[in-house]
Amino acid sequence: MKTAVVTDSTAYLPEEIHEKYKIHMIPLSVVFGTESYREEIELTATDFYQMMREQKELPTTTQPSTGMFVELFEKLSKEYDAVISIHLSSGISGTFQGAVTAGQLVQSIKVYPYDSEISCMVQGFYALEAAKMAQRGEEPEAIIARLDELKATTKAYFMVDDLTNLQRGGRLSSTQAFIGGLLQVKPLLHFVDKVIVPFEKIRTKKKAMNRIVELLGEDAKSGGQYQACIIHANREEEAQAWKEELEALYPNVEFTLSYFGPVIGTHLGEGAMGLGWMKK
């Protein structure tokens, strides 16, 4: 069986990875006023953060229409027998549900929608693994089983400079009591049951980053090989320095550098930093 792999733009996979492993991408969009931009196609992360600084109003984000999914799946059906469609957490976006609905409408190809329950390059790791297995001719069910195996070892933590965007966008699941205590705090956040929730309150960014390193260390020191990604919101130099520090600490972890692009950056804001990892 010939299987295609689709993911959405919030995986923020480099273009050369898309091309090398034939990973198809469906874009989400960011809306500034009356103008809509498809991220990774019409709007780069660098331009997005520049626009964010110039705008008074927060942009909004939109998921791909069901019709976009239907069109892509029908196009893929001319070359493939099945498609695994891997998307950002269904707890923060309806994108996954769009793939489910489109899969039910398209009769010409078998669609396997997959909820990564996360986003950004950690989601990209799933797409990359699926694509490598698909190129080897593995069956879709075996690929899904492997993704579930990876999910069992996946962790990711991130922090934001300001929770305003997450609150206003309705993407933070938390009590008002917690929110009320965050005036001078850099909270660590993570995904639980598909939604973003606070993990710990930490006073400074440096302490928050050190805490993430501790959490990675707890897993890395247990043995085995890991892959990890450092993710930043327009803080490339800082992220690169952190990567070099972590590589020296954990030789059994393969680190990559990625970014919070326009859609995720809309909710996290400039300056956010994150680290995600999974066992290889």
Image (cartoon, grey):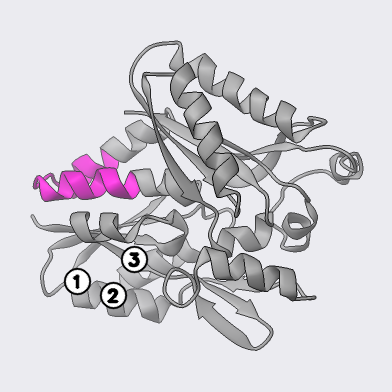
Quadrant assignment for the C terminus: top left
Quadrant in which residue 98 is drawn: bottom left
Q: CA distance from mark 2 to mark 1?
A: 6 Å
Main SS of residues in magenta: helix
Residue furthest top as drawn: 222
What residue is at 41 percent from the left and 31 percent from the top?
A: 278
What residue is at 50 percent from the left and 46 percent from the top?
A: 118
Q: Which residue is mark 3?
A: 25
Quadrant assignment for the N terminus: bottom left
Q: Which residue is mark 2?
A: 72
Q: Which residue is mark 1?
A: 76
Q: Amino acid at mark 2?
A: Leu
Q: Which residues, given as a range, are shown in magenta?
A: 126-145
Where is residue 217 shown, x and y percent of the image? 52, 17
Q: CA distance from mark 2 to mark 3?
A: 9 Å
Where is residue 43 shown, x and y percent of the image? 50, 74
Mark 2 lies on a secondary structure that is helix
Q: Is residue 178 left or right of residue 14?
A: right
Where is residue 2 shown, x and y percent of the image? 10, 57
Q: Is residue 155 visible?
A: no
Q: CA distance from mark 3 to mark 1?
A: 12 Å
Mark 1 lies on a secondary structure that is helix
